[in-house]
Image (tube, helix red, strand yellow):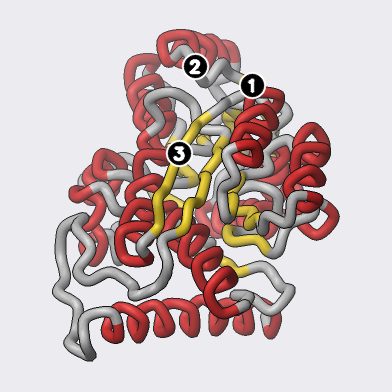
Amino acid sequence: MRARRSAYRVVIAAVVGIGLVACSSTGGKPAASGGDSAVGTANTPRIKIAMVTHAQVGDTFWDTVRKGAEMAAAKDNVELTYQGAEQAPEQANAIQSAIDSKVDGIAVTLAKPDAMKPALAAAADAGIPVIAFNAGFDAWKTANVLGYIGTDEEASGRAVGDRLNQEGAQHVVCVNHAQGHVDLEARCAGITETFKGRSENLYVNGNDMPAVQATMTAKLQQDPSIDYLVTLDAPFAMTALNTASSTGSKAKVGTFGTDAEVAKSIQANGVQWAIDIQPYLQGYLAVDSLWLYLNNRNLIGGGQPVLTGPAFIDVNNVASIAEYAAKGTR
């Protein structure tokens, strides 16, 4: 608990620092709020930052990450390039391209860290600072990066397992849409660690939503004892909810990640809850932390991960974030 509170204070301190920078860039006047347009630009030399993620095509989560990154880039006088490459070799090639184009910094996700390490070593050899975010909580310290911004995914899974126990669930299926992704595997492993009932993993093809629904349909029809489906990204939660309804299953649905559709579903008592991992904040801090390091050698986290979650969004608090989810920033 003490370590988690410390990490929480780090995030708050970082956000406060961001606010102070925004004020200083507008001559001491407070920055206006709302929308996706930055108000005021940092009076620092223009720099170039490359963001390379393992994004799947059409995934709303990564749209939100990118919005946060673009907001920070606009504020920080950063030329931002963004590339989503689902396969690790493609990610590594994108990093090498960024090195060749002489970027000033790189923000990268480490979904499959072992495959990324040679490219990250090349960035280090070129003197280019790298921040890991979103994926790689257990791997970033050995990957030639300055720090990590995201969540402890196994701890998040344990929190889900505890909640399922409190709700009286007996048979839980963790729906993994990207087999081999270290953080998704960690989420399911965390659930298994603390959940007292029966738990199992179901691997689906995250690039083909009709196939996802077909696989879940077959599973629910095969085993009517399943009373909870836990998905690992918001879009899959709605498919799980529709699948449970169409098959007549009693299974409830919870998910990691949220978006406007999931927020509305929670308000309507459809999806039961969502783990909020704050993708907008992850993208924002990934860019902003590199700007701080390049301009002032600040290191957010001081050698420790900067946590952006987990926290549960449910019917009790969803109203407080629904308007932001509707804007695509939560």
Q: CA distance from mark 2 to mark 3?
A: 20 Å
Q: Quadrant of the C terminus?
A: bottom left
Residue shown at the point (81%, 50%) measured from the top left: 125
* N-term-proximal mark, 2 vs 3: 3
Query: What is the three-letter code of the residue carrying label 2?
Result: Asn
Q: Name the mark on residue 82.
A: 3
- Residue 55 left/right relative to 94: left
**Residue 319: % across, % down:** 21, 62
Query: What is the three-letter code of the residue carrying label 1?
Result: Tyr
Q: CA distance from mark 3 to mark 1?
A: 28 Å
* N-term-proximal mark, 3 vs 1: 3
Evaluate if marks 2 and 3 touch, with contact meaning CB atoms under 8 Å apart. Answer: no
Choose between 116 and 239: the one closer to the eye: 116
Evaluate if marks 2 and 1 touch, with contact meaning CB atoms under 8 Å apart. Answer: no
Quadrant housing residue 115? top right
Total labels drawn: 3
Q: Is residue 316 visible?
A: no
Evaluate if marks 3 and 1 touch, with contact meaning CB atoms under 8 Å apart. Answer: no
Choose between 30 and 161: the one closer to the eye: 30
Q: Which residue is mark 2?
A: 207
Quadrant housing residue 10? bottom right
Choose between 49 and 243: the one closer to the eye: 49
Q: Which residue is mark 1?
A: 203
Residue shown at the point (43%, 83%) measured from the top left: 17
Query: What is the three-letter code of the residue carrying label 3?
Result: Tyr
Label 3: state its secondary structure. Answer: strand
Please tell me whether mark 2 or mark 1 is closer to you in this view: 2
